Amino acid sequence: MIRQIWGILAVCLTTALLAQAQFGPSMGAKGKPPGEGKIQGIVVDSITGEPVSFASIVIQEALERRDVDGSIADEKGRFSIVELKNARYLVIASFLGYQTKILGPFKINKDSLEHQLGEILLAPNATLLSEVEVVGAKDMVEQKIDRIIYNASRDVTSRGGTAADVLRRTPLLTVDLEGNVSMQGSSNIKVLINGKPSTIMSSSIADAVKMIPADVIDRVEVITSPGAKYDAEGTGGIINIVTKTKKIQGVSGSVNMSAGTKSSNLGTNLNIRMGKIGFNTNIGGFYWRGKGTSEIDRENLEISTNPYYRQEGKSSNNGGGLFAQLSADYDIDAKNSLVFSARFPLNRFANDNDLTTYTGDDKGQLPFLFRRASDVVFRRLGTDLNLDYRKTFDKDSDKEFSMSAQYSYTDRKSDYETDQFSESGALNYREVSPNLGSDREIIFAADYLHPLSKAVTAEGGAKAIFRNVFSDIFYDTLDLASQQYLRDLSRNNTFDYDQNVA
């Protein structure tokens, strides 16, 4: 039986990789329907008049009742849906503990591009049930004592793209155009994957969140009051990205793909569970590309010689990657379980810039100064291995003891080259820099959670961390006469840092 299970996994992995090679991976947000329409409103409690923070908003096409967009209201209950194409729409507002409200239809066309809905009154669900078991889906946003949970798998608009796009939709988080993440204005945060640190987040959170496909994310936990088991890093808060796992008996799977002129995504998921043993694998890929142009005109009023300066630039960017995750779990009995998981993120980004510079006395006819072309290729390969043991207790299901061992390694390399040319096109300068780097982390931890009351919980544990951070940066310039590269010793920088904490 075990041999058959691994055979199925091997076929799935091979199929996903072949599909990846055929279609290519993608990065970037899922394309919204093109248009200029806008729908705005405020969700409030019909009795108290208070805003309903983080209410779920879904936009449906009125004719087909198909979800086309959605959003989460902010802390003051406000929402804004933009870039809607011409059509008739329904607006569905909902939140846990309230009756769902459907408004519309609202028609978007050239004569009516914007609809201000004002206050949308949600009535509390006051129905009392007795001796009834209620089974339902999780709300899109959950509020707990120490955290806010955004259930990304429940949001149809989060499909496609990367983790950066999911974080943009998460309450309390802000992600800028470069992918930099902040929580309530603070960038001093720590990002975890399935409750554990990863070296792929060590050097650049902005780059790391672009490596994780949105389709493998189950939920995002924004922890504003971290407990004792978390390290002191991230005083602004902790973001925990939880990937998808299922405990459904049998075999199930899914394939998701989106394609566009600038970006494409591919995601696969396979779940196998037979009795106490379960396997789960997620594979996702992404690809993106873009082009740009720039022009700079400058006049220096303090000099009389060559006061005019002009620079014309062209740039192209492309990147992609693969994210693979495999987990296996074994339920020893009702109170004891073991979980092994492995993640392998891989990505490559390239940036090409071509700048031509002119300077002179006549603004209308500036002579050529030089042309400079720069190419940067960045590669990153990561490995995360985790083994976890968890024990619960009879009397109190919230009482828990856990032990974990983790190995995390990320290898980085960036190849940089700059060429400078004369007006005739002859090469007159070249420098290259193959920068190398790596992050390695080994963690052993034991944690005990003991609720003292509904409002007070005692936490204790032990942890040992062994870290190594390495980087080697150097520059070589080309000697045009001998065509040999010479090391620029004044620009060398080697960093090798070890940290052992217990």
Image (tube, rainbow, N blue to C red):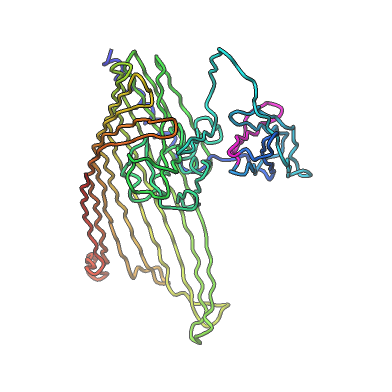
Q: Nearer the viewer, residue 239 or 399?
A: 399
Q: Position of residue 336 (x, y in %)?
A: 29, 21
Q: Please tell me whether residue 470 is drawn above or below residue 482 in the rendered image.
A: above
Residue at image coords 25%, 43%:
441
Q: Is residue 135 toward the left or the right of residue 343 in the image?
A: right
For the stretch drawn in magenta, the main secondary structure is strand
Residue at image coords 46%, 54%:
316
- Where is the C terminus found, in terms of image quarters? top left
Residue at image coords 42%, 56%:
352
Does the magenta segment cover residue 485?
A: no
Instruction: Give the extent of the magenta segment.
Output: 53-73
Q: Given the current orientation, which residue lies at the most extreme bottom position?
A: 304
Q: Please tell me whether residue 375 is drawn above or below residue 270 in the rendered image.
A: below
Q: Please tell me whether residue 166 is drawn above or below residue 176 in the rendered image.
A: above
Question: How many tags in the picture?
Answer: 0
* Res 14 visible: no
The answer to which quarter of the image holds residue 402 is top left
Q: Is residue 144 toward the left or the right of residue 43 in the image?
A: left
